[in-house]
Structure formats: structure tokens, C-alpha cells
Image (tube, rainbow, N blue to C red):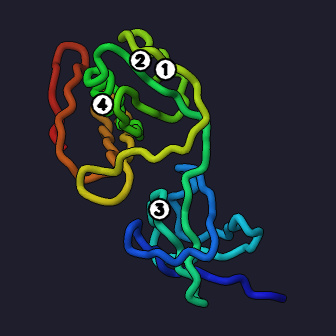
């Protein structure tokens, strides 16, 4: 039985320069805690981090033998979004907490037929592309944005809001004749 090289440490982009190998990962695959990965050379290695990490293109895994394996964003199926009113389009994407790569003149998002339909209805031009996906991180530093689950149980039962993040916002709706707002 052979033991795989192991990584317990992430080296952030710009803080290393000695990669012995690379590993190409999709956006979803760059969110991990423990997983066996295969580098470009074919060498397998185990990632075993203390907690789940969000990795960016340009980060690296430091193996216990001292070598670094650079993380590259893999090509994946995306939607390239353009339009005359790109700030308004970006607002609608952000309002849905959809990961978004912002570039001069276009936005890139993961393929989603519901979001695509909404964007086309507000005047966006949407094209399918296959490219590396490196969306903006959260406003509070390194990491990724997370969606909400605003599930409702109308009536006297529980009213659940699982936001997946710690900011405050209000949510208004009506139950028949008595509208109300929830702050959370």
C-alpha cells in the first residue's frame, strides 16, 4: 500500500512561486475540505484541510513533502451575458446571489435555464461558452457568495429563512389580508 502525498495547507495567490505541478479544477471542485485529486502529471494527492476552503485560480496546495501544486480554473459550461444596460443586468444576477465573473463588457455565470430566461426577458444577450470560471468573491474578503433558501410555511406554523450568510436584510410578503415584513 502506498501513501499519497498530502496537503494540509493552502498557499494563496501571490504568496508562492515554486509550483512543481498543477491541478485543474472547476468552480465547484475548488470548494473542498478532503478529497483525492490528480495533478496534470498524473500524480494523485490527498487534500485534507482542517475546514472547507474556497480556492481561487492561482492558489496552490502545499504538500507535506514541501512541493506546491498550483490550482488552475478548468474550462466549464458557462453563459456569457452582454447587453446595453450591463449594470442593471449585473444587479439582477447579484440579486439572485448567482456567482458572477465580471469583465469589461460582459458577465460570465454558470449555465442555468431559469436565470437565462430571466436575463433574456430584461434585454440581455446570452451565449453559451466553455471557459475557466473565476467569479468575484464575497464582499467581506476571500471566498464565494452563497445563495439563500427563503422557504415559507404560510399560516401560524414556523417561517424559515436559511440565508447561508450573516448579513441583515428584510423580506416582505402578504398572507391574505395581512402584509408583513421580516427583518433578519
Q: Residue at x 32, y 36 (%)?
A: 157
Q: Nearer the viewer, mark 2 or mark 3?
A: 3
Within 10 Å of disc 2 (Cα), the crowding (few <14, some 14-19, many 20+) is: many
> Farthest front residue?
17
Give residue 181's quadrant in the image.
Answer: top left
Label 2 to label 4, Cα distance in Å? 12 Å
Dot 2 or dot 3, earlier in sequence: 3
Q: Residue 178: horizontal and vertical position, in percent?
A: 16, 19
Depth check: 179 or 135 in front?
A: 135
Q: Residue at x 49, y 19 (%)?
A: 126
Quadrant that contains the N terminus:
bottom right
Label 2 to label 3, Cα distance in Å? 31 Å
Which residue is disc 2 drawn over? Answer: 119
Quadrant that contains the C terminus:
top left
Mark 1–mark 2 contact, CB under 8 Å? yes
Mark 3–mark 4 contact, CB under 8 Å? no
Relative to 25, is 108 on the left or the right?
left
Which residue is disc 3 drawn over? Answer: 58
Mark 2–mark 4 contact, CB under 8 Å? no
Q: Which mark is residue 95?
A: 4
Dot 3 or dot 4, earlier in sequence: 3
Q: Which mark is residue 116?
A: 1
Q: Residue 110: horizontal and vertical position, in percent?
A: 51, 35
Q: Residue at x 34, y 51 (%)?
A: 137
Depth check: 159 or 172 in front?
A: 172
Q: Secondary structure at mark 1?
A: helix
Amino acid at each position: 500500500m502506498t501513501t499519497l502525498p498530502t496537503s494540509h495547507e493552502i498557499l494563496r495567490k501571490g504568496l508562492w512561486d515554486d509550483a512543481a505541478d498543477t491541478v485543474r479544477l472547476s468552480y465547484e471542485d475548488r470548494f473542498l475540505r478532503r478529497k483525492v485529486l490528480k495533478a496534470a502529471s498524473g500524480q494523485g494527492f490527498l487534500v485534507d484541510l482542517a475546514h472547507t476552503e474556497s480556492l481561487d485560480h492561482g492558489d496552490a496546495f502545499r504538500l507535506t513533502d514541501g512541493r506546491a501544486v498550483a490550482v488552475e480554473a478548468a474550462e466549464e459550461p458557462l453563459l456569457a451575458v452582454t447587453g446595453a444596460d450591463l449594470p442593471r443586468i449585473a444587479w439582477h444576477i447579484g440579486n439572485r446571489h448567482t456567482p458572477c465573473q465580471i469583465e469589461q463588457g460582459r458577465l460570465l455565470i454558470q449555465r442555468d435555464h431559469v436565470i437565462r430566461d430571466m436575463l433574456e426577458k430584461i434585454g440581455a444577450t446570452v451565449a453559451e461558452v466553455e471557459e475557466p470560471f473565476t467569479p468575484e468573491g464575497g464582499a467581506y474578503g476571500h471566498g464565494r457568495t452563497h445563495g439563500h433558501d427563503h422557504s415559507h410555511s404560510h399560516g401560524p406554523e414556523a417561517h424559515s429563512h436559511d440565508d447561508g450568510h450573516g448579513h441583515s436584510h428584510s423580506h416582505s410578503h402578504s398572507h391574505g389580508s395581512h402584509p408583513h415584513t421580516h427583518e433578519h
